[in-house]
Image: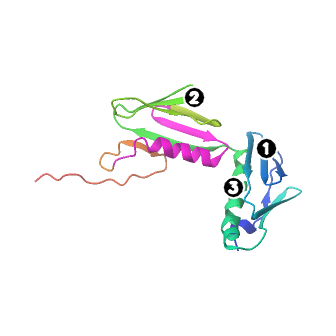
Amino acid sequence: MSRIGKKVITLPDNTELKLAGDQILVKGPLGELSRTMHPVIEVKLSGREVTVHPKKMTLESRALWGTYASHITNMISGVNKLFEKILILEGVGFKSEVKGDKIHLALGFSHPVIVAIPVGLKVTAEKNVITISGANKEDVGQFAARLRAQKKPEPYKGKGMRYQTEVIRRKQGKKLV
């Protein structure tokens, strides 16, 4: 039995949820999100409450039960309050700049790194702090991980791109005799 799947999801006042076959659509003040549901999972809407149940109790449906309940919860909270990830760029000469629908990064390579910003995300770059925000939690996290992968923080000086809450474990380096 899934602890997350058993919980009833309540819809806020300004949020609307529609079920159409295996599609689920959530509309809110900050946008709309849709997702295709797995055939072994059943979603029921009664008034302002949403419940998620497996159609048949199998190993696969038990594994997906809580997952899809979390997806629906994230969709509802995403259309009401945007998800946000903050990346910090540390290092001498490291720069970030948003130009149109692309982010230009100077990461100490011989060439600039240009990454396209996905549709539905808002990216701002100020003084080596990159803020990524959007309604879809998966898209925000995936794009932040793609940016961080361009220059991961190194353990000696901490140069590179890190999340705001991330702690870099430092190494001591060479000892002088």
Residue placed farthest to the right in the image?
Answer: 47
Q: Residues within 10 Å of mark 1 (few under 14, many from 20)?
A: some
Q: How many marks?
A: 3
Q: Secondary structure at mark 2?
A: loop
Residue assigned mark 1: 27
Q: What is the quadrant of the N terminus in the image?
A: bottom right
Q: Give residue 21's position: percent from left, percent from top.
A: 83, 54
Residue assigned mark 3: 71
Q: Give residue 48's position: percent from left, percent from top.
A: 86, 55
- Does 143 lie within the magenta span? yes
Front residue of this view, candidates 56 and 166: 56
Up the image or down, 105 lies above or below 26; here it is above
Horizontal side, residue 156 vs residue 137: left or right: left
Residue for point 59% across, 36% down: 118
Q: Which of the marked residues, 3 or 2, is nearer the chain's N terminus?
A: 3
Q: Secondary structure at mark 3?
A: helix
Q: Nearer the viewer, mark 1 or mark 2?
A: 2
C-alpha separation, residue under disc 3 versus residue under disc 2? 27 Å
Residue assigned mark 2: 101
Look at the image and give the residue range highlighted in magenta.
126-154
Q: As shown in the figure, which amino acid type bears the numbered disc 2?
A: Asp
Front residue of this view, candidates 177 and 49: 49
Up the image or down, 159 lies above or below 51; here it is above
Q: As shown in the figure, which amino acid type bears the numbered disc 1?
A: Lys
Residue for point 89% across, 56% down: 47
Residue for point 61% across, 35% down: 122
C-alpha separation, residue under disc 1 versus residue under disc 2? 25 Å
Q: Which of the marked residues, 1 or 3, is nearer the chain's N terminus?
A: 1
Query: Decide: marks 3, 2 in contact (CB < 8 A)?
Result: no
Query: Decide: marks 1, 2 in contact (CB < 8 A)?
Result: no
Q: As shown in the figure, which amino acid type bears the numbered disc 3?
A: His
C-alpha separation, residue under disc 1 versus residue under disc 3? 14 Å
